[in-house]
Amino acid sequence: IIDVNPALCRLTGYSRNQLVGIGILDLVRPDFHATVLNAIAEGLLDPYELVALAVNAEELWLEVIGRPMPYNDRDVRVTAVRDIRWRKEAEDPLRRANDMLERRVAERTARLSAANARLQEEIGRREQAERDRGAAEERMQHAQKLQSIGALAGGIAHDFNNLLTGALGNAELSRLK
């Protein structure tokens, strides 16, 4: 850091003398070092977020944007920071509410999926029962047809027997005469 403004000193609690001369990573929480190094290496012009550490070890959510510029015959990166703790604090309840909603949606989806699976099983059982009932009806109709044919054949046999009885009786009488 080659220079800072009073606003950064107020935000972090460090004095100008404490900040000038230290490396930028000394102010950044270690899990954001790669983010900062990547932004510098790629010359990112888009804002990114990081957590800085204040003099009292308080974590500060900052939005950072940097621009390369010439300064005293060398290239430097002028960086602006914005305190976004208020936004992160506002996002936290929203994130929790969203997580809870996502959890509820997942639970409801699981229950609906299980109910759908049970419904599909019931539909399958009913379709099988309908097929079984249809097959039983076909067997019953076939049995009724056979019974009707048997009754018809029995009636024909009885009528034929009656005719034959008369013919046999007359034949017997003819034989006796």
Image (cartoon, rainbow, N blue to C red):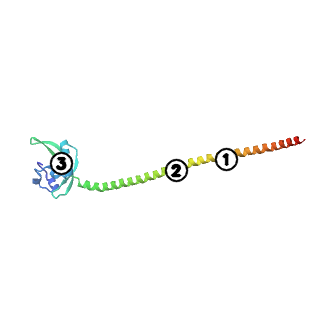
Q: Residue at x 58, y 49 (%)?
A: 133
Which corner quadrant of the image does residue 167 belong to?
A: top right
**Where does the image place residue 20, in percent across and percent down from the top left?**
10, 51
Please give the residue where the numbered disc 2 appears in the rendered image.
Answer: 125
Q: Residue furthest front?
A: 176
Left or right: 89 in relation to 105 = left
Q: Amino acid at mark 2?
A: Arg
Please give the residue where the numbered disc 1 appears in the rendered image.
Answer: 144
Which corner quadrant of the image does residue 76 belong to?
A: top left
Gap between marks 2 and 1 measured at Cα = 28 Å
User: Which callout, 2 or 3, points at the residue further toward the start of the chain?
Assistant: 3
Nearer to us of marks 1 and 3 is 1
Mark 3: few, some, or many residues within 10 Å (few <14, many ≥20)? Answer: some
Nearer to us of marks 2 and 1 is 1
Q: Amino acid at mark 3?
A: Ala
Q: Residue at x 12, y 52 (%)?
A: 19
Does dot 2 land on a helix, a strand or a loop? helix
Q: Residue furthest right?
A: 177
**Where does the image place residue 79, in percent across and percent down from the top left?**
17, 47
**Residue closest to the eye, 171 or 166:** 171
Left or right: 145 in relation to 121 = right
User: Which callout, 2 or 1, points at the residue further toward the start of the chain?
Assistant: 2
Does dot 1 land on a helix, a strand or a loop? helix
Gap between marks 1 and 3 measured at Cα = 95 Å
Which of the labelled discs sits on residue 80, or is there none? 3
**Residue closest to the eye, 31 or 161:** 161
**Is residue 170 placed above or below 9 in the rendered structure?**
above
